[in-house]
Amino acid sequence: MAIAPPISDIQVQEFIIRAVRNVCTRMLKREATFVEKSADAAYTGFKDKLHFFGSVGFVGQIDGIIYLCIPDDFVQEAAGRVLGLSSAEIEMNGDAVLKDVVGEITNMTVGGFKNALCDTGFPCKLTLPTIVRGDHLAVSGLKNTERHIFHFDCAGHRLVADIQMRQE
Amino acid sequence: MTVKRILYIEDSVTSQLIFQRMFTPDCEVLIAASPRQAGEVLAKYPFDLVVTDFMFPQADAYGVISAVRQKHGPLAVPIIVVSGSMDQALKSRLLAAGANACVNKPLLNLAFRALVHQMLTQPQVEAQSAELVIACSFQWVQEGVCHEFCPEAGLHLTGLDRLQVSAQMLAKLHELWHQGTALGRITQERTHNYTLRRPDAALTPGSTEAPKPH
């Protein structure tokens, strides 16, 4: 029997680029461009302004977690676009609406990544999303995981996908 | 023309609004935020189509499918399952459980509208891939020996190396499938750990109360 070879760095990059682009195009009607793969976890942009961090884990033959780091102003704009609400209506509804939008964006992005893993021979299941909002946020590195940090540009906003995964 | 009624089961307000905007006012859209709430709505009203998300905080879509299928035939009330985590294996399981079609989120507007229109006018069951079957097996280690059991095939293999036992199981399942054995019928696998305790167990030194039966 052929056991699937480990997922390569190139595959990880392909999977996440496809997933992010897919969600931005289909859901937000915006193009996302891959900017760079960074080795530096301490992205200074997180200190400058409010961000939402959405995370969803995947568990199975391959385990991991993906953090999607999205600037607050981008989320406001996306919520207005997706839900057809004005900025005043969004403000009136408070955090809940914005968190829900980030939850869906994160879920669909990590879902797309996870589907690619499954279809490559690494069955796994998603966990429920967790969302936080704040400034000076940072993602800690988990022990014994490979870390891949990808930067995207979507309509002038910097989106970061921080992937930490462990292969058996 | 009568307006068709769709039940959309979805816990995300964002997806609820997107769906409502997509199909209102052409259809009457009722929203349930959980499979449990959907059960109550389904008991009260008839529907032409059920569209459900797959994953909820306390359940998944299998319960919805089985509840609808117990009452209606596969074409009387079609079911579309939508999910951001719709891989080939999940799709195959959902179709086997009684879903008519499975769609990946984010939804592609035109394609999804077309699918909903088709299910409302000429319902059909999406064909399962003849090239893909998901067979379920369970693996455990007991006294240093690795066991793997496939209930559908009735196969129980053992060995000292977990990967080797898995490889043997896969080869055997391939062999059986090619010989025409029906596989892929298990749709809801769960692992339960039961805690067993003797009801008449004596108090152990230092304990203050008798063990309670579960």
Image (tube, helix red, strand yellow):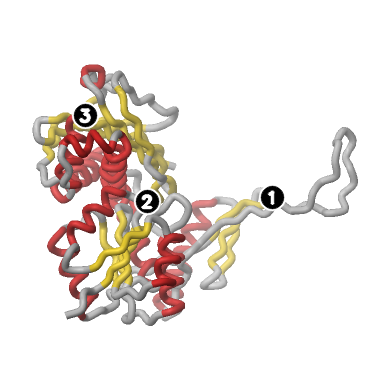
Could you classify mark 1 by the number of other residues whose Cα lies within 10 Å: few (under 14), some (14-19), or many (20 or more)?
few
On what subunit does the disc labeled 2 rest?
A
Marked residue nearer the N-terminal end (3 or 2): 3
Could you classify mark 3 by the number of other residues whose Cα lies within 10 Å: few (under 14), some (14-19), or many (20 or more)?
many
Res. B121 visible in picture: yes
Q: Which mark is residue A58?
A: none
Is the Cβ of the residue at disc 3 closer than 8 Å to that at disc 1? no
Q: Amino acid at mark 1?
A: Glu
Give the CA distance from mark 2 to mark 1: 28 Å
Residue of label 1? B143
Please state if B182 lies on the left or on the right of B214 as rendered: left
Give the CA distance from mark 3 to mark 1: 52 Å
Image point (32%, 66%), residue name:
B7
- Label 3: which secondary element: strand
On what subunit does the disc labeled 1 rest?
B
- Label 1: which secondary element: loop
Q: Residue A56, percent across and down?
A: 36, 41
Please state if A133 lies on the left or on the right of B110 as rendered: right
Q: Which mark is residue A71?
A: 3
Q: Nearer the viewer, mark 2 or mark 1?
A: 2
In which quadrant of the rendered image does the C terminus of chain A lie? Answer: top left
Image point (34%, 68%), residue name:
B132
Instruction: Determine which quarter of the picture holds residue A58.
Output: top left
- Label 2: which secondary element: loop
Q: Amino acid at mark 3?
A: Pro
In which quadrant of the rendered image does the N terminus of chain A lie? Answer: bottom left
Vertical placement of B145 versus A17: above or below?
Answer: below
